[in-house]
Amino acid sequence: LRPSPHFQEVQQRLKETDEAVFVMRLKGTPPFGGITDISPAVQRAAVGGMLNTRELLDTANTLHGGRLLKQFLSGIHTEHEIPSLHVYFSQIAEHREVEQKINSCISEQGEIVDHASPELARIRQALRAGEGQIRDRLEQMIRTPSVQKMLQEQLITIRNDRFVIPVKQEYRSHFGGIIHDQSASGATLFIEPESVVQLNNKLRELKLKEEKEIEKILRELSGLVGAIADSLKNNLQMLAELDFIFAKAGLAYAMKATLPRINERGRIKLKQ
């Protein structure tokens, strides 16, 4: 905050702070939860960039937080007019359809959910079925007594996104397939048996389709954000102003400060 030499501006600033102090005395600190500075993400979306799930969730949360703050202050304004603050919160635009669309596609953990699109749901169903088929085949293999003695451990693991089993080095020749990794000592080889190579290939194709479908969903959601970029930028400006005003009010409240009467005659009177 820089001092202002303009009487009207100083009066207006004090009025804003005074109204914010009134709000805090009446209802406590306003809800600013979920609101973050999403300016860089909004700017990228505005020029056609693709946002990641975290940026999209932050956008939805900021929209939600702005909506709750507007509702909170609007409720107070209905009963006790706060015209100076109304200038700011009345400009906060609500974009529920964008907020809801993002939340319907992305989980709180930042994962694209299955029902984000019918195609993604189909691909993931096929992926789960394929993984189950591979595991069943490998489980059957590692339970076979003649195979068990060749394994370092009776388990199925993953290397390079492929399902493999840990085979002792000396039994390498007994297995067809592909070596994907080995232990630090070299005593264990992680082999993808020949019998599951084609199934793993199919799984890889499905994973690539899944990645493409996720990218398509992210681009669609980013497009929705880009379409309201100007409105979001204005929201952020209004939220920042309100955040600052209530920060001043919080300081005034903590200091037990009172609203000063100011004049243009250069007179200063400090009591105690």
Image: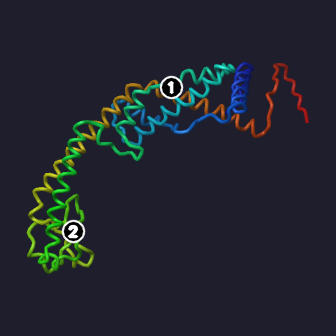
Q: Which residue is labeled 1 in the image?
A: 234
Horizontal relation, residue 98 to residue 185: left or right:
right
Query: Alpha-carbon distance for marks 1 and 2?
Result: 53 Å
Figure check: 31 above or below 204: above
Quarter residue 142 falls in: bottom left
The residue at the point 20 percent across, 60 percent down is: 162
The residue at the point 28 percent across, 40 percent down is: 215
In the rendered structure, find residue 16 and report the number of the disc placed on it: none
Figure check: 83 above or below 152: above
Horizontal relation, residue 128 to residue 194: left or right:
right
Q: Residues within 10 Å of mark 1 (few under 14, many from 20)?
A: some
Residue 151, x across and y down, in percent:
19, 76
- Which quadrant of the rendered structure holds the N terminus? top right
Confirm or deny contact between disc 1 and disc 2 (CB under 8 A): no
- Mark before the other along the chain sequence, 1 or 2: 2
Quarter residue 140 falls in: bottom left
Q: Which residue is labeled 2 in the image?
A: 181
The amino acid on which the numbered mark 1 sits, given as a three-letter code, is Asn
Q: How many marks?
A: 2
The amino acid on which the numbered mark 2 sits, given as a three-letter code, is Asp
Figure check: 236 above or below 215: above
Secondary structure of the residue carrying numbered label 1: helix
